[in-house]
Amino acid sequence: MQHTEARQIRKCYKTGDIIAHEGESSIGFLVLLSGKVGVFKGQMLAAQFTQPGIIFGELSVILGGPRTATLKALETTEAVSIPLGIEDLVRSYPDITKKILMNLAERLVKTTADFSATLGTTEEKIDL
């Protein structure tokens, strides 16, 4: 992955620093090295990332649009920004692409479980 290493930008953020603003143009995705990142939709904390190596900020790259949420350092955080578009990512780095897909699938499973838990037990059930 020499090409990616040459283009990566290592950044440090203090607690409270905004890493990316919802609605702004995206120039790539990030990899968490250390710290904690909050994902905010408006004022609501939608998710947190603490696991080193986790890829975040990838939705705007995949969708080819602006950032879908604000990313904020919840503690001192270090991350690597990788300025790649989806075409370059898929063509040149299939292992990273696979990791992104796995992360998205895991987050979808968690979101579905969280949503089901907030519904609780209801009297009405759907027969499948």
Image (spheres, helix red, strand yellow):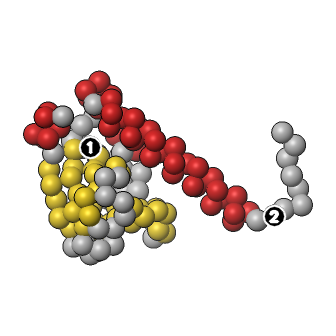
Q: CA distance from mark 1 to mark 2?
A: 41 Å
Neighbor class of circle 2 (other Cα within 10 Å; few <14, some 14-19, many 20+) is few
The label number, if any, that marks residue 91 in the structure image: none
The reply to whether residue 81 is visible in this rendering is yes
Say if 92 sits above or below 25 in the image. above
Type of amino acid at the residue the image marks with label 2: Thr
The reply to whether residue 24 is visible in this rendering is no
Type of amino acid at the residue the image marks with label 1: Gly
The quadrant in which the C terminus is found is top right
Neighbor class of circle 1 (other Cα within 10 Å; few <14, some 14-19, many 20+) is many
The residue shown at (49%, 63%) is: 46
Q: Which residue is mark 1?
A: 28
Using the image as rendered, state which of residue 102 and residue 42 is in the foreground.
102
Give the percent coordinates (x, y) of residue 98. 39, 35
Give the percent coordinates (x, y) of residue 120. 76, 65
The label number, if any, that marks residue 121 in the structure image: 2
